[in-house]
Image (cartoon, rainbow, N blue to C red):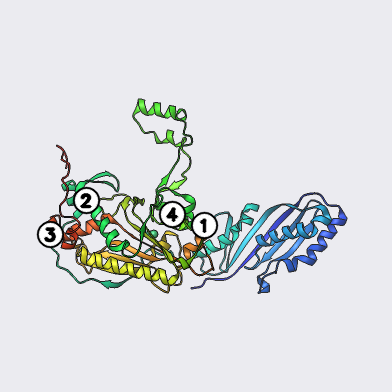
Amino acid sequence: MEKVRRISFRARATLKLSKPLEEEKRNELSNWIKLRAGELLSKGTRIKEEAAKVENFEVFDNKIILEISSGRSVRPHDALARLRKAIGEELGKKLGVGVREIQIEDYEIIFEGSNFRKINLPFTKEITSNENEVRVKLNLTEKEIYSQVPDRIVKLFLEKQQEVPTGKEIHEVRWSSQQKPHKYNVDPSLELVKRGWVKRFDQGIWYYMPPFAALMRTMEKIIVEEIAVPNGFVEAYFPKLITLEVMRKKGQLYGIPNEMFYVCEPISRDASYFEDYMDKVKVTNETLPTELLGKLKPPTYALPYAQCEPFYEIFSGEIVDVDQGPIKLFDRSGFSFRYESGGLTGLERLNAFNRIEITYLGTPEQVVEIRDKLVDSYQRVLDKTLDLEVRTVEVTPVWMAHAGVTSDVQRSVPATLDFEVYLPYRGERETSEWLEVGNASVHFDKYMQWYNVKEKKEREVWTGCSGNGLERWVVSLLANHGFNPEDWPKEFRKYLEKLPENIKLVTWP
Ligand code: SER
Ligand code: ZN
């Protein structure tokens, strides 16, 4: 339902002049504004009512005070910037002055419409409303004028008026393997702990002891050899300390800042700076986080969350050439991190987990074809090599949720497909929750825009990515086939015949 009928702006601002003006020149400046402002502030506007207008103004010896109103076309912040520039260019020489500074006294955005939700907005002095409108009064300096903050506030206001998606409201099964008989019905996480194949390190963080490590490496080998390489992907190492700027470009700083881990650098590399802290640790054995905090910078990095964040950055500010064919890379160089909420017990939900992140860039046709072939490969491996009961599901695009995008992109093809495995210990296949073990996405041209990537001839370029949780693949195998290697599917055993011995302690496992 469309709630907004019209958006308009009103502002009161002062243009401070670089030098005082005598009366004659003040009159000249007044006349110039009367004659020029109308044309200047409606330039490029098709609908006249949407353009900016100088409602009132007064020229003093060292400043001009203006009241500007507008619709959505040339907004007051644009109008002020245009006026400043034109005064400099057209009158600067003649009057011997320019505009030194723009000072905003009032800046109001008026949203006409009904049924608005109550929301919070940044840079806001006051929000008032009645049945017909909401008025947002902003607190702005020249910096926000030039960085177009008011436009982003409008966008944010409109976004926040929409229903917040719950994450997975689309869930449509697109393909299913055959139903398979189930030999095993135990929660593998409990059994893994009991056998000592894994050992808890901290909340959602585990040691993978030799038998489990061998299973993880086997899954990795299967994904690389049966999915990534046959589809033409080549290995690369992606950075694992991700600058906040790259997180911002991917949208994660406004999409999921509450789900990432952050990394702080010490303020100094000089050990003497830490002497008092080191001494305290020695004499108290405490870790003293508050003492330490003063010696750390605010976070400069976050840990990889989607793992593909740095992929798009390769192309940022660069020019790609789709005539060279699509770009296909995969990264298996380490953990991904998600700040999950408390009480994590099993290995299906983790703060630190492993995945092979598969990333691609090309023309829309190429990206769609690459994704479709990946989907075929995933389905075959999960169904045949691992002999699991599996289905492919179209879901709400996960990458959009990560970027806090609430209004959907126009979808010509499914944006995200998930692969879900049935876990017998969770109950009936019809009613229980299946485990998502991977996904394959098309991002359309979104990241090309957000990361500012150009194409040689301005042809359309799309990206996509596909990830998988290796721990979940192991859990899926064990939950369906049990812990005895002899019961594992033949195709899987080709990769791993025997498990290595585990270490044994008096008290563990
Ligand atoms: N990067 C995608 C995700 O975070 C695929 O792994 O889900
Ligand atoms: Zn990704």
Residue farthest right in this picture: 24
Q: Are marks 4 and 2 in contact (CB under 8 Å)?
A: no
Question: Ligand 2 is located in which of the four quadrants?
Answer: bottom left
Q: Secondary structure at mark 3?
A: helix
- Report, in whole angstroms, how far the alpha carbon at label 4 lies from the one at label 3: 40 Å
Label 1: few (<14), some (14–19) or many (≥20) C-alpha neighbours in 10 Å = few
Q: Is residue 300 left or right of residue 495?
A: right
Task: Give the residue type at disc 2.
Answer: Ala
Q: Is residue 118 left or right of residue 371?
A: right
Q: Which residue has dot 2 on it?
A: 214
> Quadrant of the rendered structure where residue 506 is?
top left
Q: Earlier in the sequence, mark 4 or mark 3?
A: 4
Q: Which residue has dot 1 on it?
A: 120
x and y, in percent, of residue 407 in the image = 46, 67
Please state which of residues 45 and 109 is positioned toward the viewer in this rendering.
45
Residue at image x 65%, y 53%? 142
Q: Which quadrant holds the C terminus?
A: top left
